[in-house]
Image (cartoon, rainbow, N blue to C red):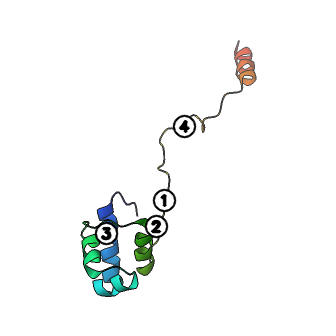
Amino acid sequence: MKINGVKEIANTVRGRRLELGLSQKQLAESVSVSRKWLNEFETGKARADIATLMRILEAVRLELSIDKPESKTPSAADRQRPDLDQVLEEYRKRR
């Protein structure tokens, strides 16, 4: 699943918590945050440091994956330079 913002992470965590049948209190206690903080996190109001986010994801058995976006045009590093000798040889053959 591609996530484009914090609210999408919060909604995913909330949905997964509900799938697992966990209350906010149970999840909050398991990751050492208050129920109020978790409620605010799930509604997109609270800010989380990465360590807290990772504890929450682990508790609801979700993983975080980070990938580079796919480029539609190759970068200069990805493009191969033409072999000048080969280009000239092909040109000579056509003449």
On residue 75, the disc is: 4
The residue labelled by disc 2 is 64
Q: Position of residue 21 (x, y in %)?
A: 32, 87
Query: How far, Cα to Cα, is label 1 from label 4?
Result: 20 Å
Residue type of the residue flagged with mark 4:
Ser
Q: Position of residue 56 (x, y in %)?
A: 40, 76
- Counting residues from the start of the chain, the first of labels 1 and 3 encountered is 3
Q: Give the mark count.
A: 4
Q: Position of residue 42 (x, y in %)?
A: 27, 72
Query: How far, Cα to Cα, is label 1 from label 2?
Result: 7 Å
The residue labelled by disc 3 is 10
- Counting residues from the start of the chain, the first of labels 1 and 4 encountered is 1
- Check whether the beta carbons of the residues at disc 1 and disc 2 lie within 8 A of each other: yes
Query: Hey, which residue is sitting farthest top in the picture?
Result: 95
- Crowd class of label 2 (few under 14; some 14 to 19; many from 20; radius 10 Å): few
**SS class, disc 4:** loop
- 93 with respect to 63 (left or right): right
Q: Quadrant of the N terminus?
A: bottom left
Q: Position of residue 71 (x, y in %)?
A: 48, 44
- Counting residues from the start of the chain, the first of labels 2 and 3 encountered is 3
